[in-house]
Image: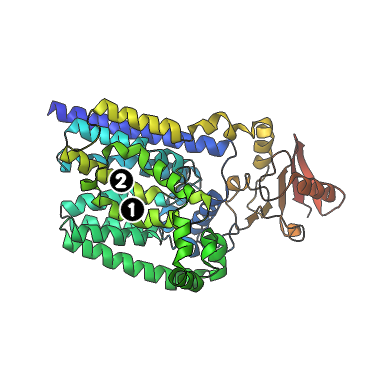
Amino acid sequence: MEKLFQKSYILGAILGISTSILFISSSLRHELFNSSGDLAFFDQGIYLISQGETPISSIIGFHALADHAAWILYPLALLYKIYSSVYWLFAVQSFALALGGLPTYLLAIQAGLKKSQALVMVGVYLLYPVVYNSNLCDFHPDVIAVPALLTAVLVARSRKTAWFIFSIVLVLGCKAVLSLTVVAMGIWLLWFEQRRFYGAIAIFSGTAWFIIANNFIIPVFGTEAALLNRHLYRYSYLGNSFAEMVQIFLSHPGVIINNIFSAINLEYLFFLFAPVLWGLRAESILPLIGAIPCIGLNILANHISQKNLVLHYSLPALPFLILAVIATLANGKAWIKQNRTIILWSLMGFLVLGKFGFFTSRYLKNLDNWQATKDAIALVKTPDSVFTTDIITPHLTHRKLISFKYNSQDLYKFHYILLNLRHPGWAASATDYQNLVNQLQIQSKFKLQYQRDDVYLFVRAN
């Protein structure tokens, strides 16, 4: 009993420390003005839901449900009813990513591993680079799906139907495309895990949600043109619409093949598998069936953002990589069996592929006028409309109208105009903003309220 308590204490400490590290890292990145449009979109949408408003984002121009049919944003809005703060999203994301260590531990024990090996698998999971990296990638509901997918497999093997259904529903609520992952997991459970009932539930629910989300929810709340601008540009070589993509896919398979077998895809696959390569053997890779949709979409894309471990796009593959490694260890067939060596391998993978180093380089680029920017933000005291730069936007999204998309003709509809000429971001150049400042200074419609270190705050005159 004493040893059991000790192992539980160690596991709890690991998960607690991991949550804290992840939360501090994402919060610090945000405070250093390195957040971007995705965080602004989710923060504004959830805030509007919490206020009983329609969550039509001024960041992307359409309803929050039109993005990924992520209904999980609605229960998340309950946290904003307690207190409206973007730090809830960092807390949820950090907790969800760290929490994946718990079902990882239980799956390892369930597979017959020793408790010490199970703790090592928790370390393998937490040190996998995409866990830390995706935590620094603004906020995405996908993170909630990671512990939910691991839990779904755990409870399917334990034949706990209610928990399995809950886990599947939670995954589907995070992102419409995760329905493909649920279907793939269902195929694996049905044919290879001998959990036919649970596999059937996953296949049916994943297929049904894919149809409902893509044929009803997303079209009702958005438009195909908006989706093309938001997502499908990543597959632009396949065409400019869903129908055209299917046609090219069927009639010109050579285009697909040439894109798949490219150097960048080989590099992506190498880095994806390298952190757990020691634990992958042919006889234990069947769990990777569940990772096929995620990996397939990434290698089909012709946009570099989906072909690395810096962003969150590989997260849905992680649970199945962990399951494959657990299976290999359980069979005693791992290339490396010593616990210390496994942790050392994982640590080396984290040190090479984790982007913690950005805190000593890229994330410090805004420090030279950080205080001036913070002071200007503090002067935006009302929920009136704001035009600002893309890096300031996530700090002021609790309002109906905020934008960083530069259009000189639309600026007069904003109450506040907040600019940082020294760090203009990607939406416009420093020259554009300098011209705008010159224009605003010579007219009576706006009053200069604050100026320091190339930071300007204008307020529309009454």
- Mark 2 sits on what residue? 321
Secondary structure found at label 1: helix
Find the residue positioned furthest to the right: 442
- Asked if residue 266 is positioned above or below residue 12 in the image, the reply reads below
Residue 222 percent location from the top left of the image: 53, 69
Question: Looking at the picture, how far across and down is residue 457, in whole percent?
Answer: 74, 44
366, above or below 210, in the image: above
Quadrant of the drawing holding the C terminus:
bottom right
Tell me whether the residue at label 1 lies in contact with that at label 2, contact meaning CB atoms closer than 8 angstroms. yes
Residue receiving disc 1: 291
Q: Dot 1: few (<14), some (14–19), or many (≥20) neighbours within 10 Å? A: many
Which one is nearer the viewer's eye here, 460 or 425? 425
Q: How many marks?
A: 2
Per the model, the C-alpha gap separating discs 1 and 2 is 8 Å
In screen coordinates, is 337 left or right of 445? left
Question: In this view, which residue lies farthest toward the left?
Answer: 1
Where disc 2 sits, the SS reads helix
Amino acid at dot 1: Ala
Disc 2 crowd rating (10 Å Cα; few below 14, some 14-19, many 20+) is many
Q: With 228 as the anchor, is 404 left or right in this view?
A: right
As drawn, the label of residue 149 is: none
